[in-house]
Image (cartoon, grey):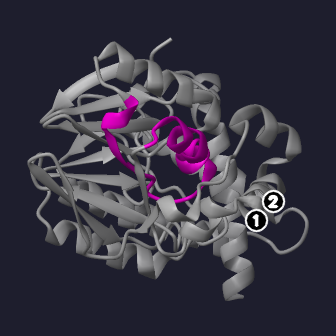
Amino acid sequence: MAAPAQPLMHGITRLDTLQSRAGMAACYAIVRNGEVAFIEAGTSPGVRALLAWLAQEGLSVAQVRYVMPTHVHLDHAGGVGLLMRACPQARLVVHPRGARHMIDPAALIAGATAVYGPERVKTAYGEIAPVPADRVDIGEDGSLWPLGDSTLEIIDAPGHARHHFCVYDATSGGLFTGDVFGLSYREFDTAKGPFLMPTTTPVQFEPDAWCHTLDRLLAKQPERAFLTHFGVVEGLPALADTLRQGISDYLQLARAAPDGDGRHEAIRNSIAALTHRQLRAHGVTLGDDQIEAILGLDIDLNAQGLGVWLEKTG
């Protein structure tokens, strides 16, 4: 089955990578003059659907020029090895800090296992295959990557993770932002627009670096952001302000949490309560159970990441 696809603009298609639920995580395919770039690869179980989409569009695996995960967290890069294996002409373009983890994913697997547990890693992420070193290119800050009649630019983007970059596409006026422009699920869209919240996944959440990254991204004067979680948002200056406020609110909640064994639960409960209040103010009418089903994992990971940040900063 081909990945659920939504054609967008300028040869860009949003592909659902078929993770925990529909509408959770996207990969973007850019097709320019017969050349293809995948921004993100999702997880290994979804790679077959990406390949089926290529075939459905009359594109061959030999036309895939780049695979570009914004960072090496497994929901973005877990499928890279299998996708590269299937696309023999493709080059992997990856952040300098992430390259070694794509060549030898052992530490990546161990880190994910520590966060999610071995059963979830096995069922959700499947085989995490290595990429031959001679097929790996380093996506340095400011580097340019030709694709058909266009060029993609890499922008170093720490804050969510130190191994994170964004991809700027001047043709669409868009930024492929991975997790550094937060997450915004379409179930929460209202007349007030999209609902945006930070994603402070462990273990490299750095709030000052994140705010600096937002400044750098807005300096490109982008028209839109292509979020991995999930879809296209516009009006980025106002959304960036929302994201900065969200980061500030999270820090306040984390600092207020008690030390000891109950800290994670306290942070999680505080984030959940804040998020529910914000969603109601935004005009979201879904039930509390529905909201928890959509955001429960994200809230838990955010609380974990804030706990790690507290341990690092004292």
The answer to whether 236 appears left or right of 48 in the picture is: left
Residue 243 lies within the magenta run:
no
The answer to whether 192 appears left or right of 179 in the picture is: left
For the point 37% across and 69% down, the residue is: 139
List the residue tagged with mark 2: 110
The answer to whether 44 appears left or right of 94 in the picture is: right
For the point 40% across and 47% down, the residue is: 90
State which region is magenta.
Answer: 61-88
For the view shown, which residue lies furthest in the right direction? 261
Q: Secondary structure at mark 1?
A: helix
The image quarter in which residue 107 lies = bottom right
Q: How far across and how far down the image is residue 193, in percent?
A: 25, 36
Q: Which quadrant holds the C terminus?
A: bottom right
Q: CA distance from mark 1 to mark 2?
A: 5 Å
Q: Residue 4: tell me if it is visible.
A: no
- Front residue of 81 and 294: 81
The reply to whether discs 1 and 2 touch (Cβ–Cβ < 8 Å) is: yes
Q: Secondary structure at mark 2?
A: helix
Residue type (three-letter) at the residue carrying disc 2: Ala
Q: How far across and how far down the image is residue 283, in percent?
A: 36, 31
Residue 63 lies within the magenta run:
yes
* Dot 2 crowding, Cα within 10 Å, few <14, some 14–19, many 20+: few
Residue type (three-letter) at the residue carrying disc 1: Ala
Q: How far across and how far down the image is residue 234, in percent?
A: 19, 45
List the residue tagged with mark 1: 107
Q: How far across and how far down the image is residue 112, in percent?
A: 75, 54
Residue 25 — which label?
A: none
Q: How many marks?
A: 2
For the point 43% across and 80% down, the residue is: 209
The answer to whether 18 appears left or right of 104 in the picture is: left
